[in-house]
Amino acid sequence: MAPGPVPMSVPVQAIRFESVSKSFDGRRVLDNVSFDVLQGTACCVMGRSGTGKSVTLKLLMGLLKPDSGRIYVNDTELAALDSRELVDIRKTMGFLFQYSALFDSLSVAENIAFPLRRHTRLTEGEIQASVRERLAEVGLENELEKMPLDLSGGMRKRVGLARALALKPSILLVDEPSSGLDPITTLEIDNLLMNLKEANQTTMVVVTHNVPSARRIGDKLVVLHEGHIVMQGKAEELDRSKNEVVRQFMESTEGRQTHGVL
Amino acid sequence: MTAAFRRLCSEAGLLSVFASRTVRAVLRRPFELREIVHQIVEIGWRSLPLVVMAGLATGVVLSMHTRATMERFGAEAMIPTALAIALLSETGPLITGLLVAGRVGAGIGAELGGMRVTEQIDALESLAVDSFHYLAVTRVVACMIAMPILTTVMNFSGLIGGYLAETVISGVSLRVYLGQAFQGIAFADYILPTVKTTVFGFIIGTVSSYLGYTATGGSEGVGRASTRSVVVSSMLLIVVNVVLVRIIQMWLRGQSL
């Protein structure tokens, strides 16, 4: 009997925003925002400062609650979860903060071991091995005992990434990976994220205003402006856009002069 | 004026909600025993040198004042007793409370405030850790456990300070001094004022955790949280002490509250 047609795998949504709005002190930061991210892909959310990019990530992690709309992570609506269930969802997610948010009082190794000690039953030896493995992934295997304040911005970012990856999350949220970093370090961080996506099929949401970075990392780009999504799609689609905000954004960060709307 | 009063009421309401949330959380898992022990060491053990020094100095000063008064009535023999009563019933608990409010309250306010503005509290949450339990509840419990212990150390140091001042003047032995000191003191005179300091610990821990945990506005906000932690917890502690002293007095006299 001849084999039947091979079923095509249906892309699964790992993250879905449905008409999400969020205000602070009467100012609407996100207004009716909807987008989704497929499993194993990277979505880069771009926009000017104060357009709600970081708020998007905090909503995704359940650190903030939306005023209206729904947020789904792996088909589970965050608002429907009690605190215990939210903790379980968070264990499947990693968050790299803009300024790394490393625990000042803990060494590099202790920062990465922290989630392992809290959420796994690994022995001390296994924890140390896992810490070394994570640090090797980000190229900092020799910085185990340093304190966060002794590290450069790029190194802090890498340690933050290693900590975010400690529990081997299926979803990684990254806030401004290139902020405050030189172009070479930015490229290194970008490469780390891309390798991670390729090797582990990690779903990523990366907030950035660095278009070259977004082009490298993102399978999909979302442009936020004044709380609205102006456009979403592949980088080439955004390049062809006639929308003034999108056009100026894509052009200005490629080295041309910023003017007008942005 | 109205806006300031409204803000004060709002802040008091939020602090009350935070305090009641803390009380409920103490009885809920996770108990974070390791972090509580760590905080007891940070709060209690590291406050010991300050408390011992303050106790010794207070004992010496109280003894000198008591002698000046007692000499007029020819009642020098009562000096150790008067000093012990003053220390155990009021001076020891209150001074310990104010010292801890200064050292620990400022520390908690600054530490949690710093963690808030540098997103370390968000990082804890993102690592699936209940930051309220891990940071606030553990510190409140540690303050409540450390306060009676520190108060006992303060009382003992005060008595030693009093003895040192007395022995220089009258040459009294430690055994005689302590015998006289505890002559007029019942166990309840020690236990009730000391137990009352757990309430001081609750106030210091809750106020400073609340102000640090909710800090905003960068390094300026951290400084504000630290300063306000000391001011608000000291003020509350002094006011609540009046009520607690009245309750203790009624208890000791067997009156109904």
Image (spheres, rainbow, N blue to C red):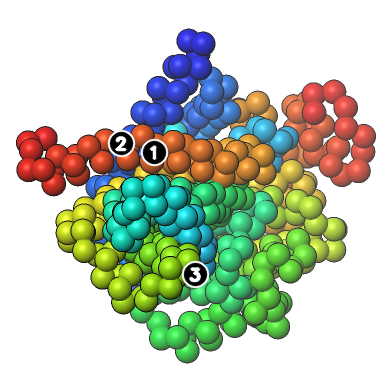
The N terminus of chain A, quarter of image: bottom left
Marks 1 and 2 belong to one chain: yes
Q: Is residue B140 above or below residue B241?
A: below
- In the image, taking residue A61 as reference, residue A214 lies left or right, namely right
Q: Mark 1 points at which residue?
A: B238
- Measure the alpha-carbon separation of dots 1 and 2: 7 Å
C-beta proximity under 8 Å, tags 1 and 2: yes
Q: Mark 3 points at which residue?
A: B168
Q: Under tag 3, what secondary structure? A: helix
Mark 2 is on which residue type?
A: Val
The amino acid marked with disc number 1 is Ile
Disc 1: which chain?
A: B
Which residue does the image show at 65% across and 79% down from the upper left? A145
The residue nearer to you, when weighing A76 against B5, is: B5
Query: Would residue A126 be seen by someone viewing this image from the given angle?
Result: yes
State the residue position of label 2: B242
Amino acid of disc 3: Val
Label 2: element kind: helix
Vertical placement of B121 versus A188: above or below?
Answer: above
